[in-house]
Image (tube, rainbow, N blue to C red):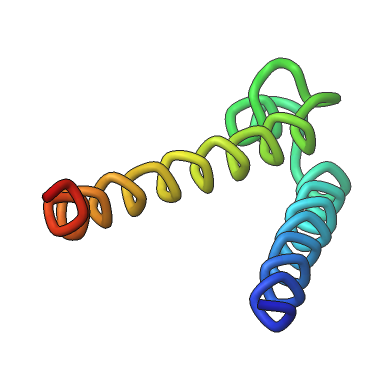
Amino acid sequence: MFKRIFWLGLGVTAGVVLVTKAEAYVRANTPKRAREFILGEDQDQVASRTLAGLVRQFTQTMQERQDELDRRYLDRFQG
């Protein structure tokens, strides 16, 4: 269990760092119009939008997996 939490935390941290670094690179090396196309009009909230998207995707995947497990095993325990 500890390994899973560790690797999940490491993956989330790496994702946030990579997105932040990529965003900084794009801001420094692209013209304004290209930045707006890539990052959107609200460029100050890219990191928080990305993190919210990651959390939303994780939650959705977790719920799908839970539903799959419920379908597979719940009928065994209901008698």
62 relative to 43, above or below = below
Q: In the picture, which quadrant includes the N terminus?
A: bottom right
Q: Which residue is rendered at x = 62% and y = 41% of the image? A: 55
Q: Within the image, what quadrant is residue 52 found in?
A: top right
2 relative to 19, above or below = below
Q: Within the image, what quadrant is residue 11 found in?
A: bottom right
Please tell me which residue lies in front, 57 or 77: 77
Which residue is at the far front? 79
Q: Which residue is rendered at x = 59% and y = 28% of the image? A: 37
Left or right placement of residue 52 versus residue 16 in this view? left
Location of residue 44 in the rendering, given as x and y in whole percent from the top left corner: 85, 25
Left or right placement of residue 63 versus residue 20 in this view? left
Location of residue 42 in the rendering, given as x and y in whole percent from the top left corner: 75, 17
Location of residue 46 in the rendering, given as x and y in whole percent from the top left corner: 75, 32
Please tell me which residue lies in front, 34 or 5: 5
Left or right placement of residue 69 versus residue 38 in this view? left
Please tell me which residue lies in front, 26 or 43: 43
Q: Which residue is rendered at x = 53% and y = 48% of the image? A: 58
Q: Which residue is rendered at x = 64% and y = 23% of the image? A: 40
